[in-house]
Amino acid sequence: MAYYKYGNYLQQEQGAEFDVLHSPGNLTPHSGIYRCEVCGGSAVSTLGNPLPPQGHHDHPAGARPIQWRLVAKAHWR
Ligand SMILES: [Zn+2]
């Protein structure tokens, strides 16, 4: 999960970039917070760098591998 205190610092958007699931290690398409669709954990990743690898965190035996979804996009203005 990702957490925040002041909602006025966040703005909801409807962009398709929030609907795409990414495999671990793929290049990060947008700097921001990514959520693991399997366990709900989150991580920060920055544009052009690899998303956290499969070994970023453990899942219970038999659970699917990590899939990352963008949940909060960082922007400089
Ligand atoms: Zn996970």
Image (tube, rainbow, N blue to C red):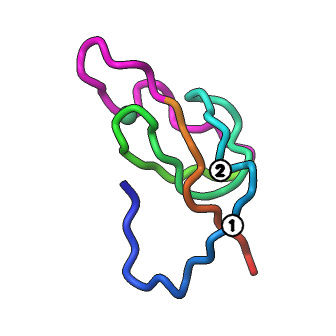
Q: Residue at x 62, y 33 (%)?
A: 22
Disc 2 marks which residue?
18
Q: Is residue 62 magenta?
A: yes
Whole-angstrom CA distance, mark 1 to mark 2, is: 9 Å
Classify 55 as above or below 77: above
Q: Which residues are magenta?
A: 48-66
- Residue 21 appears at what percent x and percent y? 61, 34
Q: Is residue 9 above or below residue 50?
A: below
Which comes before the other along the chain, label 1 or label 2?
1
Mark 1, residue position:
13
Does the beta carbon at disc 1 come under 8 Å from ligand 1? Answer: no
Q: Secondary structure at mark 1?
A: loop
Query: From the viewer's perspective, is 11 left or right of 42?
Result: right
Residue type of the residue flagged with mark 2: Phe
Q: Quadrant of residue 50?
A: top right
Report whether 17 appears left or right of 5: right
Question: Is 23 contained in the magenta span?
Answer: no
Q: Position of residue 68 (x, y in %)?
A: 54, 38
Using residue 65 as the reference point, say whether residue 58 is left or right of it. Answer: left
Residue 72 in the image: x percent, y percent?
57, 61
Q: Residue at x 56, y 77 (%)?
A: 10
Residues at circles 1 and 2 in contact by the CB criterion of under 8 Å = yes
Q: What main secondary structure does the magenta stretch of the protein show?
A: loop
Pointer 2 local density, CA inside 10 Å: few below 14, some 14–19, many at least 20: some
Name the element at disc 2: helix
Q: Residue furthest left?
A: 60
Residue at 65% across / 66% down in the picture? 74
Name the quarter showing ligand 1: top left
Residue displayed at 42% across by 49% down: 42
Q: Is residue 32 above or below residue 65?
A: below
